Image: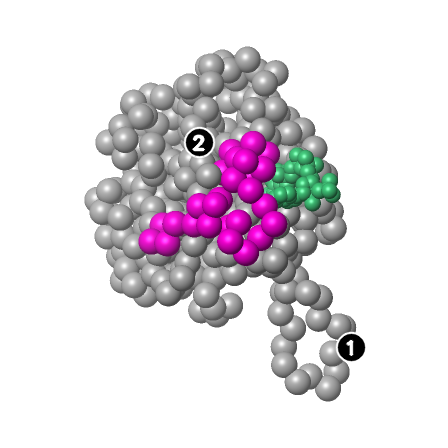
Amino acid sequence: MSFYVAGTGSALPEKVVTNNDLTEFLDTSDEWIRTRTGIERRHVLTSERLDDLAIRSAKTALQDAGVSGEELDLIMCATMRADTFTPSLACTVAEAIGSTAPAFDLNAACVGVLYAMEIADSFIVAGKAKNVLIVSAEAMSKLVDWTDRSTCVLFGDGAGAMVVRAGEGRLSGVLSTKPDSHVIRMPNIEGLNSPYNKIAQEPLAMHMDGGEVYKFAVNAMGRNIEEACTRAGIGPADVDWYLPHQANLRIIDASLKKFKIDKSKVLTNIADCGNMSATSVMVLLDQFAKKGTFKKGDKLLFVAFGGGLTSGAVIITWNKE
Ligand code: ACO
């Protein structure tokens, strides 16, 4: 007994910013961004709140699964930046959907949803949960320096959710880290007016060594795919749909190249959404589920990498009713 995905949802900010829009205040071009990353536009928060998007996506996923807030046994939110430190985003969602289930946020950067899926599996296998809500919401536009063209053009904002339920579905999972505190770094805020704190505030924006991340990503995604397939007792060619983290089309192509996979099996939304960190695979899942792409029994492989440096892969069979 493990879990299957019983429902999905997503919500994106209304404001769409194209690559050309960015050239109004940055020394960049549509051609540079498109050819280096595959990104054409992204959704960006303006006057909406991130927690409202998270709640909307959660309600859609619950409705899709036919589950009420009261029937949930656990709520997890994968996020690097909720609107509030406390309450957690998970507690804010719980309040909105009428749930008293244990609720907490987790931060594994872009791999957060895969971490949450593995934790859900552990709760369900241990008999501690039957219905688990996993939400992911990221406001990347509030974490970058909008004068730094090497990072701000890469990201987008959004929210997504899935309900996973006890049953047959998950085939395998692998999570790993290659600890490195410099390659991707995003400092947190210090408290105010402490007479004791002697640590100077680091600049409050993302720093990234793009080339190093690129090398790590290609290596980690390939390794995690192989390991997850081995654990599931299948080969990469047996996977029906690949749902990779949407950071860069060239990273996706390079990490899958050695498996000689038919490109039509590799799902992407990076052109329209950019990199939404942990939320990318969740929105990807919902968009293609709603299009009717997945048939019962299809094998789906999620693979992701992110700050930490974290990485992982999870394989499930699509058994949604
Ligand atoms: N527009 C124009 N020029 C730019 C831009 C831009 N937006 N950004 C950087 N440049 C310039 C740089 O200044 C540099 O110029 P220089 O050579 O004169 O110094 C040059 O472009 C660098 O070009 P390339 O080396 O060709 O860039 P590369 O092909 O390495 O692509 C990129 C850069 C897209 C960042 C790539 O390295 C990458 O995708 N890395 C992985 C990033 C990633 O995945 N991040 C997400 C993980 S973290 C998370 O998801 C939370």
Q: Which mark is residue 198?
A: 1
Whether residue 105 is visible: no
The residue under label 1 is which amino acid type?
A: Lys
Image location of residue 202, percent across then percent down: 71, 66
Q: According to the image, label 2 marks what residue?
A: 268
What residue do we see at 44% from left, 46% from top? 18
Q: Is mark 1 within 8 Å of ligand 1?
A: no
Residue nearest the observer in this picture, 56 or 239: 56
Q: Describe the element under mark 1 as helix, strand or loop.
A: loop
Image location of residue 132, percent across then percent down: 37, 47
What residue do we see at 71% from left, 71% from top? 201
Q: Where 286 falls versus 181 (above or below)?
A: above
Q: Which residues are magenta?
A: 12-39
Q: Describe the element under mark 2 as helix, strand or loop.
A: loop
Image location of residue 119, percent across then percent down: 49, 45
Q: Is mark 2 within 8 Å of ligand 1?
A: no
The quadrant of the picture showing ligand 1 is top right
| Screen quadrant of the N terminus | top left
